[in-house]
């Protein structure tokens, strides 16, 4: 029943797929690819790039902001899971809006917003990665940023399975780095445990709660992996 409904929706939105000789994408991605891809975007943007900015705004309260963002984005994740199953197409958000409202101008506007969001998030991650590379490479930041953009662009030009496999390898490295940090914190857990009460701001501390609110908005960027997974569902 679910497969029939999915096929009917896809054929209504993209009638060219119903033709027997129309070109189709070959399924090459596996569940492992999808999981590592989604995790990599979330970990890379949310932890390695945004953690410094989050700590600068809300200090010890930053984990609270990430938890709040995760709760809010959980509803978005559920929506993407449902709609991505019904309409496994590359233009995910635009296709969802087109199926709901049947307005090409509206779905086109959503598509442009997705492009803009991707450009902003890509620039954020690029600048963050250049900051890490700048520790080891004695070059101006602008040079490193340009090199990162060109390199990632070249990798993106490869096939889907090759480029996402590379992203999956980077995800494994990122997770390894986080495990080392967690292990170091657990090894010296005395100061960490003593500061746990600082995670929650005082009820009347408006400055602290404002910082948490600002950080929550910033932390939403950490969950951009959701839409990337939906967009790759056409595979």
Image (tube, helix red, strand yellow):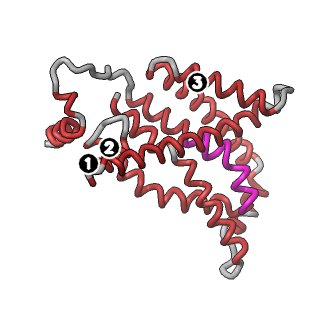
* Residue stretch in magenta: 42-58
Name the residue beneath numbered marker 3: 153
Q: Residue at x 73, y 47 (%)?
A: 185
> How many residues crowd around disc 2 within 10 Å: few (fewer than 14), some, or many (20 or more)?
many
SS of the residue under disc 1: helix
Q: Position of residue 26 (x, y in %)?
A: 32, 20
Q: Is residue 181 left or right of residue 136?
A: left
Q: Residue at x 67, y 43 (%)?
A: 49
Name the residue beneath numbered marker 1: 99
Q: CA distance from mark 2 to mark 3?
A: 25 Å
> How many residues crowd around disc 3 within 10 Å: few (fewer than 14), some, or many (20 or more)?
few
Residue 44's mark? none
> Which residue of the protein is positioned furthest toward the bottom in this rendering?
204
Residue 181 vs residue 69, the one in the foreground: 69
Q: CA distance from mark 1 to mark 3?
A: 32 Å
Q: Position of residue 87 (x, y in %)?
A: 27, 41
């Amino acid at each position: 029943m679910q497969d029939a409904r999915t096929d009917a929706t896809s054929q209504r939105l993209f009638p060219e797929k119903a033709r027997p000789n129309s070109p189709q994408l070959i399924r090459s991605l596996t569940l492992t690819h999808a999981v590592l891809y989604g995790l990599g975007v979330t970990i890379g943007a949310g932890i390695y790039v945004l953690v410094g900015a989050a700590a600068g705004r809300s200090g010890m309260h930053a984990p609270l902001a990430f938890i709040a963002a995760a709760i809010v984005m959980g509803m978005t994740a559920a929506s993407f899971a449902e709609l991505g199953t019904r309409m496994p197409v590359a233009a995910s958000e635009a296709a969802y809006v087109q199926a709901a409202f049947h307005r090409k101008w509206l779905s086109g506007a959503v598509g442009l917003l997705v492009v803009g969001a991707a450009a902003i998030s890509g620039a954020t991650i690029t600048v963050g990665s250049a900051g890490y590379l700048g520790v080891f490479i004695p070059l101006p930041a602008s040079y490193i940023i340009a090199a990162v953009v060109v390199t990632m662009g070249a990798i993106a030009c490869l096939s889907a399975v090759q480029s996402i496999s590379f992203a999956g390898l980077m995800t494994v490295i990122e997770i390894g780095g986080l495990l080392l940090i967690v292990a170091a914190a657990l090894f010296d857990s005395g100061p960490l445990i003593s500061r746990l009460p600082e995670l929650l701001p005082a009820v009347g501390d408006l400055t602290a709660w404002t910082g948490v609110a600002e950080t929550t908005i910033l932390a939403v960027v950490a969950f951009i992996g959701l839409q990337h997974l939906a967009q790759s569902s056409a595979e």
